[in-house]
Image: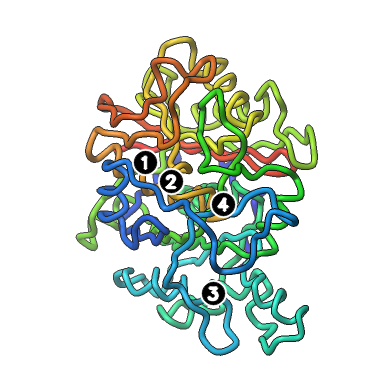
Amino acid sequence: MVHTLLQMDTFHSENQQPRQAVVTDAVLVTALGGDIDTLWRRLMQKGTAIGPISRFPVDQEHYTAGIAAIIDDLKPSRDHSLIKSLLDRLMVQMGPVPSDATLITATLKAGIDNLEAVCRGNPSGFQDIPLSSLAEHISPQIGLKSNGLCISASCASSTIAVAQGAALIESGQAEAVLVCCAEIVSEYAFAGFSSLKALAPAPCQPFDRGRRGLSLGEGAAALLLMPAARAGREGRDRLGTICGWGITNDAAHITAPAKGGHGLAQAIDKALKSAEKKPEEITAICAHGTGTIYNDRMELDAFKHILGPRKRPIFSVKGAIGHTLGAAGGIEIILGLKALATLTIPPTIGFTHPEKGAEGQVSAETQAIANGCLLTTNSGFGGVNAAIILGP
């Protein structure tokens, strides 16, 4: 069955009750920790995985930076991409997945490292290069009936994938959805961001007024979604709820966001309406927080415009694990659920001198949060913006 993004804006009649999607299982792999508990502990300890790159040469003549958050012991196998090794490390943590689950994958460039090898005349396979290669690798491992679909929408890819999964469940088109996202630090991506002068020479500093750009990272995440009723019948854990979502495209620039943040503001507004939540019910925000000049500033403007002037805790994990591109949203949703469960958000690594609007909200220390909902946002090239509201 083919599902399209057009089905995401689902409206229910007065006699039809929406079925909220709950997250029952979640696993992740990052450069700072290979599982949720390790990553969370190291975040709380103010750790960072951003450091010198040894995977490929990064001389100053060709690149503006020489650092990233890389999983050092991640190795390719035979002619397979690093991304397959990353997916294997992820899926070994995953519990049983219902055979009727719809698979949604998310990535920007899949096994682009294989294309690099081919272009250099080195032995390598083409099978890992297409975006569909993620599903083709995952689906047989866990016994799914189809490969589903892949969403590649810049740095909002996996946020949109989770929203799509929740929409399929809410509308009754799926009884379970497995969302898998993954991204590696490839020389292809590194060179691209360097050419845009978007890479910081030192580890990134989200929401700091001295920020100079982003730091790349790699990682993967998987989330199993299903209706609350099914989760209860099957005795599954309930890690949290996908309460609502909003997706927009401001189309302001091929790479930069709209400086006023109106596209992100509209996505947040749509998410609130979808969740039937008021701004005061948002008690914390997991921001995209890349450490680039325009992204951080427009996010703060968008938050204030839609949520009002009241200060609330905001954090970004990109100073710790780097910007994981197409996997960022999935990883950050899992961390958002962990924050709601512990009523604590981690420190924003690299944050020292607040950008205007970050005062009293972003902190280099852990912050306690009140019971309520958490907003998580991601934005990307081409003006795409995505917002999801998480609840307990």
Q: Residue at x 27, y 41 (%)?
A: 44
Q: In the rendered structure, which amino acid carries the disc numbered 3?
A: Leu
Report x, y in % for residue 379: 61, 39
**Quick one: label 1 or label 4, which is nearer the N terminus?**
4
Front position in the image: 113 or 260: 113
Contact check, label 3 and label 2, Cβ < 8 Å: no
In space, the residues marked 3 and 4 are separated at their CA atoms by 16 Å
Q: Residues within 10 Å of mark 1 (few under 14, many from 20)?
A: many
* Residue 298 drawn above or below residue 54: above
Q: In the rendered structure, which amino acid carries the disc numbered 1?
A: Gly
Q: In the rendered structure, which amino acid carries the disc numbered 2?
A: Glu
Residue 234 image-quadrant placement: bottom left
Q: In the rendered structure, which amino acid carries the disc numbered 4?
A: Leu
Q: Secondary structure at mark 3?
A: helix
**Quick one: label 3 or label 1, which is nearer the N terminus?**
3
Front position in the image: 239 or 9: 239
Contact check, label 4 and label 2, Cβ < 8 Å: no
Report x, y in % for residue 220: 46, 61
Q: Residue at x 71, y 86 (%)?
A: 122
User: For residue 82, which numbered disc appears in the image?
Assistant: 3
**Foreground label between 3 and 2:** 3
Q: Residue at x 39, y 48 (%)?
A: 48
Contact check, label 3 and label 4, Cβ < 8 Å: no
Q: Residues within 10 Å of mark 2 (few under 14, many from 20)?
A: many
Q: Residues within 10 Å of mark 3 (few under 14, many from 20)?
A: many
User: For residue 332, which numbered disc appears in the image?
Assistant: 2
Judging by the rendered image, the residue that carries numbered circle 4 is 216
Residue 175 at least partly seen: no
Contact check, label 3 and label 1, Cβ < 8 Å: no
User: For residue 336, which numbered disc appears in the image?
Assistant: 1
Report whether 372 appears left or right of 161: left
Residue 259 at least partly seen: yes
